Amino acid sequence: MGSEHAVLARLDRVRKHYGAVEALAGVDLKVRGGEMLALLGPNGAGKSTAIGLLLGLESPDAGAASLFGEPPHELQARRRVGVMLQSAGIPDTLKVSELLDLTRSYYPNPRSVADCVALAGLDGLLPRRYTKLSGGQQRRVQFALALCGRPQLLFLDEPTTGMDIEARQTLWRAIRELVAEGCGVLLTTHYLEEAEALADRVAVLNRGRIVAEGSVHEIRAHVGQRRIRCTSALPAEWVSAWPHVLDARRDGERLEVIADAAEPVVRRLLAEDAELAELEVQRAGLAEAFLELTRDSIKHDDIKEAA
Ligand SMILES: Nc1ncnc2c1ncn2[C@@H]1O[C@H](COP(=O)(O)OP(=O)(O)OP(=O)(O)O)[C@@H](O)[C@H]1O
């Protein structure tokens, strides 16, 4: 295996409790070079805890965390990492240019200011005071600070929260460029389209457990749901009561049906409505897969807890 896909960070059977809360309940995770891993999960699933352990900000109760094969708190390992966390802890009296110069000075071979500005979309922001920037602009500066040391591994904890579409697309472009250069990226996000657009692999965390892991395609394939769209006058409430139909809704003339099997539903749609047109059947997206996976595991846990 080339160094490109070497494992840069890993959790091995990691458990972490906060009092009675089991934040991670035996998690295995690997982040490789030249790859983006998206860590998805509902609020409180354990995503930030996993990142905190990989960065050495927290210690596991059991199992092991490692960064470049070393304990994560080792300075040598941490120098090779760029981090964008939800709480930034940035000194707020400085201008953006001063923040960038200061952070670049920590690294032996930093990226040029011009590169950082281009990658993070900081045009016009360098002379501005960090505290006076909008939330989305501050996130862009945090991204520049995360990448200015030429990290081999980037941790991005909900990086695009508060960004407008253009800023989000600039960040996506930059992330793709960094991954193509061989950087490993661990991304957490609540925007599933972000994971769908960027991730090579997805791990879904729920209640401290990995409930699914694989490519976006594999995660989608985990669930058998199909999305059926057509132009039809059939009432959505009626269709939603048919066998195999999980949900049906109307958007103007278009009827959208989520089903656990496409063929019987399509046959009945065609039989009930001779005028039906523009029929499309798709595998459901990551959002549906994610909801189903996390819903199933909640049910599963509830059953186990009740037993
Ligand atoms: N320092 C702490 N003290 C006590 N409980 C904590 C602490 N940090 C996290 N927890 C709890 O551990 C669980 C996992 O939290 P974590 O922040 O890792 O979730 P998350 O997946 O990052 O959530 P979000 O999407 O809301 O950011 C939650 O129940 C949370 O309340």
Image (spheres, helix red, strand yellow):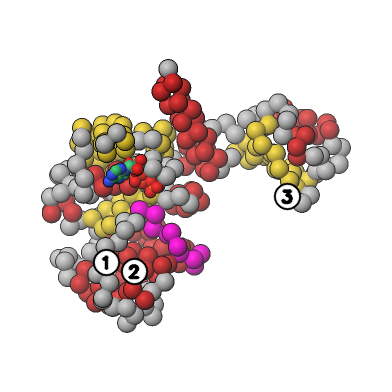
Picture residue at 81% right of the left edge, 39% below the top = 234
Q: Is residue 211 left or right of residue 258?
A: left
| Mark drawn on residue 251 | 3
Regarding ligand 1, which quadrant of the image does it lie in?
A: top left
Residue 72 showing in the rendered view? yes
Q: Residue 160: percent from the left, percent from the top?
A: 42, 59
Q: Residue 169: percent from the left, percent from the top?
A: 47, 63
Residue 163 on the magenta span: yes
Label 2 to label 3, Cα distance in Å?
A: 40 Å
Look at the numbered discs 1 and 2 and tell me whether their residues touch, using CB distance below 8 Å: yes
| Residue 100 vs residue 87, the one in the foreground | 87
Magenta span main SS: loop
Q: Residues within 10 Å of mark 3 (few under 14, many from 20)?
A: few
Residue holding disc 1: 90
Residue 67 showing in the rendered view? no
Residue 244 on the magenta span: no
N-term mark: 1 or 3: 1
Which residues are drawn in magenta?
Answer: 157-166
The single residue placed furthest to the bottom in the displayed view is 127
Residue holding disc 2: 141
Task: Quadrant for residue 236, please give it.
Answer: top right
Labels in figure, total: 3
